[in-house]
Image (spheres, grey):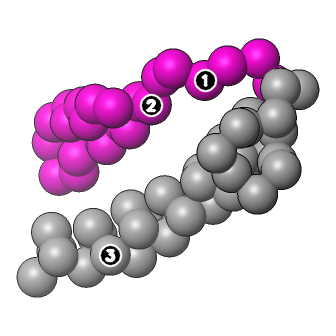
Amino acid sequence: MSFRLKDLGSKTEFTLIHGGWGEPDAVVPSGPGMTNAQTRERMNDGWESIVHEGLCKVVEE
């Protein structure tokens, strides 16, 4: 996982990169029976909340 920050003047662009996913239809062996695609989507929803609510709040204070 890596984070990239880019200075856009009065704003900062934030990019989160997470690699290492298997085939989209493969079931994650240590999870609740979800495919890689389902797990990735669920995690993406969590990151959206963390970044747009939590990180923005900390950075803007």
Instruction: Give the residue number, with chain letter if any, for mark 3.
Output: 54
Amino acid on which the number 1 mark rests in the picture: Trp
Distance Cα–Cα, label 3 vs label 1: 25 Å
- Picture quarter with the N terminus: top left
Q: Residue 44 in the image: state x and y as whole percent.
A: 60, 51
Amino acid on which the number 3 mark rests in the picture: Gly
Amino acid on which the number 2 mark rests in the picture: His
Distance Cα–Cα, label 1 vs label 2: 8 Å
Along the line of sight, which residue is nearer the eye, 60 or 16? 16
Q: Badge 3: how crowded within 10 Å, few (<14), some, or many (20+)? A: few
Residue located farthest toward the front when viewing the structure as drawn: 30
Residue 18: which numbered mark, if any? 2
Q: Badge 2: how crowded within 10 Å, few (<14), some, or many (20+)? A: few
Work out whether mark 3 precedes mark 1 in sequence or the reverse, and give the earlier one: 1
**Quarter holding residue 36:** top right
Look at the picture and state if 22 lies above or below 2: above
Mark 1 and mark 2 in contact? Answer it, CB < 8 Å. Answer: yes
Instruction: Give the residue number, with chain letter if any, for mark 1.
Output: 21
Q: Can I make out residue 37 in this image?
A: no
Residue 46: which numbered mark, if any? none
Under tag 1, what secondary structure? loop
Q: Residue at x 88, y 26 (%)?
A: 25
Closer to viewer: mark 2 or mark 3: 2
- Picture quarter with the C terminus: bottom left
Give left or right: position of 30 versus 24: left
Along the line of sight, which residue is nearer the eye, 47 or 12? 47
Q: Residue at x 27, y 67 (%)?
A: 55
Under tag 2, what secondary structure? loop
Mark 3 and mark 1 in contact? Answer it, CB < 8 Å. Answer: no
Q: Which residues are magenta?
A: 1-24
Q: Can I make out residue 50 in this image?
A: yes
Along the line of sight, which residue is nearer the eye, 42 or 12? 42
